[in-house]
Image: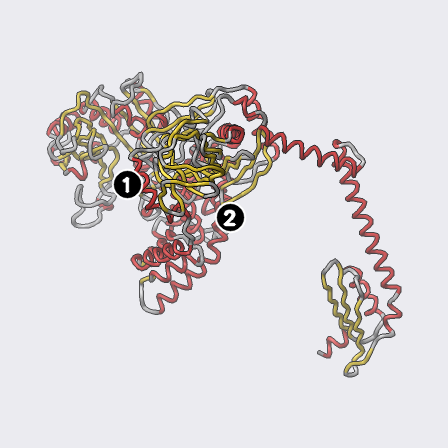
Amino acid sequence: MQSNLVRQTFIDYFKKNGHTHVPSSPVIPIADPTLLFINAGMNQFKDIFLGNETRPYNRACSSQKCIRAGGKHNDLDNVGYTARHHTFFEMLGNFSFGDYFKEEAILFCWELMTKVFELPSNKLWATIYRDDDEAGKLWKKISGLPESRIIRLGEKDNFWSMGDTGPCGPCSEVLIDQGEHMKCGPTCGIGSCDCDRYLELWNLVFMQFNRSEDGSQTSLPRPSIDTGMGLERITAILEGVQSNYDTDLLHTLIEKVGQISGRKYSKNIEGSPFRVIADHIRCLTFALSDGAYPSNEGRGYVLRKILRRAFRFGLKLDLDKPFLYTLVPTVCEIMGNAYPEIIQKQDYVQGIIKNEETRFQDTLSEGMKRIEETVVAIKKSGSNVISGDQAFRLYDTYGLPLDIIEDVATDERFTIDMPQFHSLMQKQREQARSAQKDTALGQNIDLYEVIRKHIGKDVVFTGYETETAQTKIAAIVKDGVMADTASEGQAVDIVLLETPFYAESGGQVSDIGTIHSESVSIDVCDTVTPLTGLIIHKCTIRSGKVKQGDTVTAEIDHERRSDIRRHHSATHLLHHSLRAVLGDHVKQSGSLVTPERLRFDFTHFKGITTEEADRITLMINNLIRSNLIQHTDIMNIDQARKAGAMALFSEKYADTVRVVSFGNVSKELCGGTHVKATGEIGFFTIVNEGSVATGIRRLEAVCSHAADNYFIEREHIIKELSSILRSAPADFSEKITKLLDEKKTLEKRIQELETQLSKANVDDMLKDIQLINNVPALIKNCGDTNAKALRAIGDELKSKIASGIIALASQNNNALVFLVMITKDLVQKG
């Protein structure tokens, strides 16, 4: 029975038994910051088990896409070396949310295994938690298994918990005995080894307790069931093969690797590169299709590590050029029927992988040479340790990732002196820090702590509601120390009890403006937040005198704030439009919002085409004309994520966040200032797009007044060009092309004339031949003759002398050109 039929048979069986089939969620967790990747079937039902969500069904089944390559569940290092470890796999599962419990779960399991899949009952074993007498009795009653094939194990093997506290309970595993020939040794047995003779097929979790902080357990009012069975494992059993890599899920990929490498696959250790590549390309295809992207942090780093590991194993098969991307269509052929999203994203996924491979190839070409030299040197010395210094040099000087160095060490059965490596890394960080100049904020950080304690409470930011505020001077800093007063001409830092001034953060620049009263006028040139809850105004006293405790009016530059608001709101519309046009993989990776322009950095693996830029611009301007109303909600971070608000993975947020929405189009976590409706933005246009790092693009744009100025400037340029070219703008392209063609023709004609003129002077030049050591030699400066003409002169001269040396020189377009020609007879003489 092949994998597609196994998957469908499982789903059909549970649908027949009253379960709702729930499609797999993406491998990228939704609203769950605790996970890098979805790693179990129950992940998408977590809130139901916790009682935070209800659904219109209480029985479910699924085949869930899973990745285990980071965090607590990480199988990466074992992949390729065992028959059953994977980074990507599918987990078949059935779930009960307070409906049926142990008896039905065991009954469904046994019936599917023995009646539907027709596995031999005399080969099946069960494990239960040591104190779970109820499960033991049910197994004997339902399956007829003898006591000797129902094994009791401890908490490590047969007790499951969601965390230190919360739902938990005993579990029961079903295993199959694959035979004596799979035995690992004399102590082989369930609970005493981890070999493949007794292969775990299905885990049934009986969620019946709630664990408190003190470790005590109380019964849940509605016990639930969570089960998981690896599709790859059950398929291997049903196809009669001893390795998951021999199933139809992976063997076709292994064959494809053999075709492109010209190498033959072996099921022993020599075949590990084939298995690594087959596994990793599945993982990459699904992760990238679901919106992940290679990067240097979080899940992106894990994916980059997986891709580079696969590429390095390709080198063992002499695949030294990008090849992984060519395997994506094979993954789609095998699994596209079950998961059509990978077919839809095939070209996109191939593009990302090829780009990553190409860049890594450049890094590896030099780094791998160096590590091979290092390995040879270590072996010659009789050692088996890569010193921390050697590892650091490979990492720091040659750009070789540490995981690659670790993989090579594993292959060579070497160890790495990691303490020394980390010591050198720390030393480098300290040197980098000491090389940086102290900023004004860094120098005064202790002072700001004193000020915050002096005020006794956080400064209140009123800038969301108002642009002017009546407030009091809470503190004055002059020449790096606290002061009671400041007077005309002095530069000071001022802290207000309340302020409408926005301090630079989240990419939005700070406000400027004035602080004034009847006795003083102060210019605010910058606003910063050195510590949480403290806002510092960088000021110059224009006139008068100010003292601590004075009542003043704080007023921002209204027009400047308006332009900042417009550009900031435009970035939200831009983020939405980029994802709509380029794909859901687009994520913000940085931004700058000023009164004059916006800059937006985002994840994408190639440049934006003119057509894509036009679609993005039109979409944004349509949203502006729709005059979408801006709405701000204050909510806790979990509520925000569940509401679908865009947030950066691994970004730290406060418990309470601001969610800024524009209609039903855009919803983002944001602390910046925004327009009340998109119509205020006016008009939007892209002015520049380019690359700033691997996989990161940068787009610059303007809107409102800045867009007006941009188009006025362009209009002036167009009018000037129209006057120069004596042509209408619509004819510019044709006119310029014609002028360039004419220029090219004239340049060619000039070269021809120069050549003819130079040839005409050849006879005169021959008069300057001189004898040097009895060898005729002509040495001549030919002025500004171009290279082509110089060659023609040389050929003409050579044809007219029987024997000799010709040395010509010229300077053309600021370039020196030298030509030396020797007749054949002199060459033969040596």
Q: Find numbered disc 1 in the image and state the secondary structure of the residue it sits on.
A: loop
Give left or right: position of 196 versus 504.
left
Residue 358: give its label: 2
* Colour scheme employed for the rendering of this structure: secondary structure
| Residue carrying label 1 | 72
Give left or right: position of 427 versus 757.
left
Q: What residue type is labelled 1?
A: Lys
Q: Where's the N terminus, which quadrant?
A: top left
**Residue 6 point in image, percent of width and height:** 34, 30
Q: Nearer the viewer, residue 13 or 739?
A: 739
Q: Disc 2 or 1, which lies upstream in sequence?
A: 1
**Residue 369 point in image, percent of width and height:** 45, 60
Give left or right: position of 402 versus 769.
left
Q: Nearer the viewer, residue 467 or 398?
A: 467
Q: Which of 828 and 604 is in front in this view?
A: 604
Q: Residue at x 85, y 75 (%)?
A: 768
Question: Is residue 198 at all visible to an observer of this figure?
Answer: yes
Q: Which residue is drawn at 36% across and 53% down?
A: 407
Callout 2 environment at 10 Å: few (<14), some (14 to 19), or many (20+)? some
**Residue 530 point in image, percent of width and height:** 38, 41
Q: What residue type is labelled 2?
A: Thr
Q: Find numbered disc 2 in the image and state the secondary structure of the residue it sits on.
A: helix
**Residue 48 point in image, percent of width and height:** 27, 23
Residue 206: give its label: none
Position of residue 139 relative to residue 534, above or below, is above
